[in-house]
Amino acid sequence: MTVPTRSARSSAELIRAEGPVLAHNYHPLPVVVARAEGTWVEDVEGRRYLDMLAGYSALNFGHRHPKLIEAAHRQLDRLTLTSRAFHNDRLAEFAEGLAELTGLDMVLPMNTGAEAVESAIKVARKWAYRVKGVPSDQATIVVADGNFHGRTTTIVSFSGDPAARDGFGPFTPGFRTVPYNDLAALEAAIDETTAGVLIEPIQGEAGVVIPDDGYLTRVRELTRQAGCLFIADEIQSGLGRTGRTLAVEHESVLPDVLLLGKALGGGIVPVSAVVARREVLGVLGPGEHGSTFGGNPLSAAVASAVVDLLATGEFQRRASELGEALDAGLSALTGRGITAYRSRGLWAGVDIDPAIGTGREISERLLREGVLVKDTHGSTIRLAPPLTITREELHSALASLEKVLLQGT
Ligand SMILES: *Cc1c(COP(=O)(O)O)cnc(C)c1O
């Protein structure tokens, strides 16, 4: 079978064709990607772009990493789906590997990030009633302002983003919001009804917001003292992005419940997981939670190959080393079109001087220079290249950024 190299329609025609038939819940940059390899994507007309977004960290290993593609092909030729009505021969290896990689005991396989978050909310509530002894239907979960945990009705119930919430009520009760990086507010919000504290160790969607040193350590202490769960949403921050397997490792903290997604599917299939201590995930019994596709053999095979890649430590090391180059490059541009930035590993939120342009405008100018990034929240752009990026490619992306910033208004 041959793969056609070009769509019969041009980029412009394809974008126009989407208008009347595709829901308008996104505002994509005007590029129509047709193929990709490693850190590079190619549009319908054959123009090449350096991918500095990597599917919001779903492509941590780049596009079509040979080991992941091989794992997928091999599994496609053998077994793709069983449902959980039966065992499949890939699931044990996936769960063992992920438990070992994270240092936790038990794995609940799901598909999307939002499903992992939903699953963790259910597990935390059940744990609160069964183990902690919270009176029925009284459990609360403390969350942070500026959070992004997904798009379901329950999750947008505790979003602070008006676009995510407005028009979607009534909302799910049982959540308390505190400012991010504010330990006093967190401590005040926790009481005997608290099932857990759900936070991102670094807030990605908010613009790569990194809490003060010691924050995660103190969240761990506070939750332990209060007898509630520390639930870390590492769907975007995890799996090598920050220079460690998990962002919580920067403070040597182990949460009770860890949420993974995005890169876990190797850029091939949606795979997410709740990973937790046995005492916590052990509260689920047959029929109490599930998913038709969760833990399917194709997903398990690809995710096992992802775990194998991470077990080498190579990608964490690259993110850490090249992260220094990224930080140095952004530091040199601060005051020259960038007002501030935050970075950890190969991940950065960059605040653009509003006099030069909005985040969207800068993203569009970078697109014309052959570099893909995406704005988040007005004047901020997010950089999250594949962890396979070379030093030369990173420097070339930074040079393109410098060029578009110096173009000015
Ligand atoms: C992307 C993301 C989610 C939601 O994942 P989906 O797969 O889009 O449902 C949840 N939490 C965080 C931190 C994320 O970055």
Image (cartoon, rainbow, N blue to C red):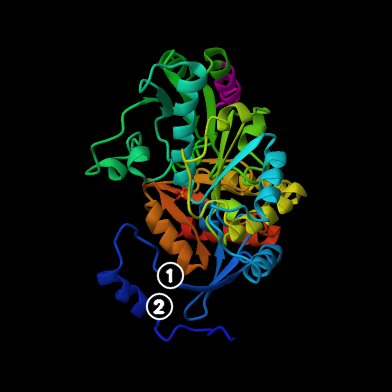
Amino acid type, residue under disc 1 in the picture: Val
Above or below residue 339? Residue 303 is below
Where residue 184 sits: x, y (%)?
A: 46, 15
Residue 366: image location, x then y, percent: 48, 62
| Outermost residue toward the right in this view | 312
Q: Which residue is mark 2?
A: 11
Q: Quadrant of residue 256?
A: top right
Instruction: Report the amino acid beneath label 2.
Output: Ser
Quarter that holds the N terminus: bottom right
Q: Which residues are magenta?
A: 211-221
Picture coordinates of residue 291 (x, y %)? 48, 49
383 or 62, nearer to the observer: 62
Foreground residue among 224 and 81: 81
In this view of the protein, which residue sits in the foreground, 263 or 217?
A: 263
What numbered label is drawn on residue 31? 1
| Magenta stretch: includes residue 220 | yes
Say the numbered circle drawn on residue 381: none
- Of labels 2 and 1, earlier in sequence is 2
Disc 2 under 8 Å from ligand 1? The reply is: no
Q: Residues within 10 Å of mark 1 (few under 14, many from 20)?
A: many
Left or right of 244 on screen, residue 193: left
Q: Nearer the viewer, residue 38 or 224?
A: 224
Badge 2 element:
helix
- Label 1: state its secondary structure: loop
Q: Are marks 2 and 1 in contact (CB under 8 Å)?
A: yes
Q: Is residue 211 visible?
A: no
Asked if residue 285 is among those painted magenta in the image, a careful observer would answer: no
Residue in view at x 65 percent, y 62 percent: 393
Residue at the (42%, 13%) spot, across then down? 188
Q: Residue drawn at (68%, 58%), measured in percent from left and top?
A: 388
Q: Does residue 158 sit above or below 229 in this rendering?
A: below
Q: Is residue 103 above or below residue 327?
A: above
